[in-house]
Image: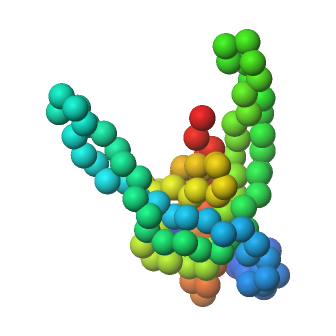
Amino acid sequence: MQLGGGIYETYGDLMQAGELTCRVEVQKPKRTEGAGGQPKVEWIRYDHRWASVKPESMKERMQRDKPESSGVWKVVMRYDKNIDETMRIVEGSHALNISGVTWDTHKTWMFMTCIREQ
């Protein structure tokens, strides 16, 4: 999905390569069969990239009598036509499932909405 003017004016003109301060690993799923023939997803490296990774919203909930945080994260990196919603971003110990991908009109930057894995 391509976004026009608004997102580019907000991020594209202001975004500088120096703002990509997080080294992330982009992973893609490889579907295999586990013991007993059950389907299993194994994550393999697609690429290492510099990105901006920031929480957009966080909510805390109780699970098994302890607080658990989950939320929506925004990831910005240079455009790559092969990165899509089937992939995930790993930053440190956090795995972020890509739920949406957009880009600016010049296909310089891509903007991803991600959900943190529990």
From the viewer's side, name the closer residue of 11 and 86.
86
Query: Does residue 38 sit above or below 4 in this rendering?
Result: above
Residue extending furthest left?
Answer: 37
Query: Does residue 105 sit above or below 54 in this rendering?
Result: below
Residue depicted at x 64% and y 48%: 94
Q: Can you give x and y, in whole percent of width and height, for residue 49 in the image?
A: 59, 74
Residue depicted at x 24% and y 46%: 32
From the viewer's side, name the closer residue of 3 and 75.
75
How is the model colour-coded? rainbow
Residue depicted at x 69% and y 46%: 72
Q: Can you give x and y, in whole percent of width and height, for residue 106 in the image?
A: 60, 87
Q: Specify the quadrant that holds the C terminus.
A: top right
Query: Does residue 103 sit above or below 68 in this rendering?
Result: below
Can you tell which quarter of the image residue 45 is in? bottom left
* 28 to the left or right of 65: left
- Residue 65 visible from this viewpoint: yes
Can you tell which quarter of the image residue 76 is in? bottom right
Residue depicted at x 72% and y 61%: 53
Query: Does residue 89 sit above or below 69 in this rendering?
Result: below
From the viewer's side, name the closer residue of 4 and 14.
14
Q: Can you give x and y, in whole percent of width and height, for residue 24 in the image?
A: 61, 65
Q: Can you give x and y, in whole percent of width and height, for residue 92 in the image?
A: 66, 55
* 105 to the left or right of 33: right
